[in-house]
Image: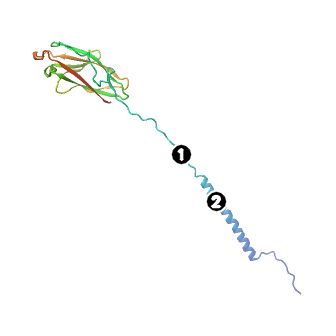
Amino acid sequence: MPRPEHSSSTPTSGTRVRKALGGGRVRAALSLGIVLGLGAVGTMAAWSDTATATSGVFSVASIDLQLNNNQGNPAYAFTTLNKTNMMPGDSVQAALPIQNKGTAPFSYTMSASATGDATLAGFLKVTVLDAACANQIIAPTALSTSAAKPIITVGRNLAPSTGSETLCFRVALDPTVTVASQNKTVNVSFAFAATTA
């Protein structure tokens, strides 16, 4: 008599293989999802930004030396410094404001040159005094028609825009002047030169 057939609950080897393969696919899919998730996070972190700085204004300073509010070009007419019919020992003096009307500080020097009779020029001496014409600043210097004579050799400083000082210039005829200088004339020019301090 044939034996009755019984169903076995024990999974066959093929079933186990299929389940194992199916589980592998799930795990692979999950792993792939994790990798994609990490990749997305890395992409979102790649932010960027920019910034710009703009400079201020650049400008060039100016030097503007003036004599009694005059540019001195052409030459300022220093007409208060003149004297005719001078006698030995005579002198004349006049004050002159020197100003810095520019935007940069500077120091200035000054030289004097003479035109006219060369002999008489050697007997004329220039002295620089303070604004009151009382205190000597620069000792007497004889003039010359052959070359400019340095008078103010050490630079005098003036602040920008409002810097100003008044100096007194005295021209004296040496008492030892000779008779040969009678009726001779001389003109004097003062040249001021400013450089940035």
Q: Mark 1 points at which residue?
A: 50
Give the residue displayed 41% in from the left and 34% down from the top.
59
Secondary structure found at label 1: loop
Quick one: 137 or 74, which is closer to the camera? 74
Q: Which mark is residue 95?
A: none
Q: In which quarter of the image is the C terminus?
A: top left
Which residue is depicted at the point 65% across and 63% down?
Answer: 32
Instruction: Determine the residue positioned at 71% across, 68% down.
Output: 23
Residue 165: name its quadrant.
top left
Proximity of marks 1 and 2: CB atoms separated by less than 8 Å = no
Left or right relative to 50: residue 183? left
Residue 188: % across, % down = 21, 21
Tell me if residue 173 comes above or below residue 102 in the rendering.
above
Depth check: give the residue in front, 117 or 177.
117
Residue 171's image quarter? Answer: top left
Task: Report the residue marked by disc 2.
Answer: 36
Direction left: furthest residue? 179
Residue at (72, 69) in percent of width and height: 22
Q: Position of residue 81 (x, y in %)?
A: 24, 16
Q: Distance between the residues labelled 1 and 2?
A: 30 Å
Amino acid under disc 1: Thr
Asked whether, in this view, residue 78 is left or right of residue 41, the answer is left
- Work out whether mark 1 precedes mark 2 in sequence or the reverse, and give the earlier one: 2
Q: How crowded is mark 1: few (under 14 residues within 10 Å), some or many (20 or more)?
A: few
Name the residue furthest right: 1
Apparent side of residue 31 relative to residue 154 in the rendered image (left or right): right
Amino acid at pointer 2: Leu
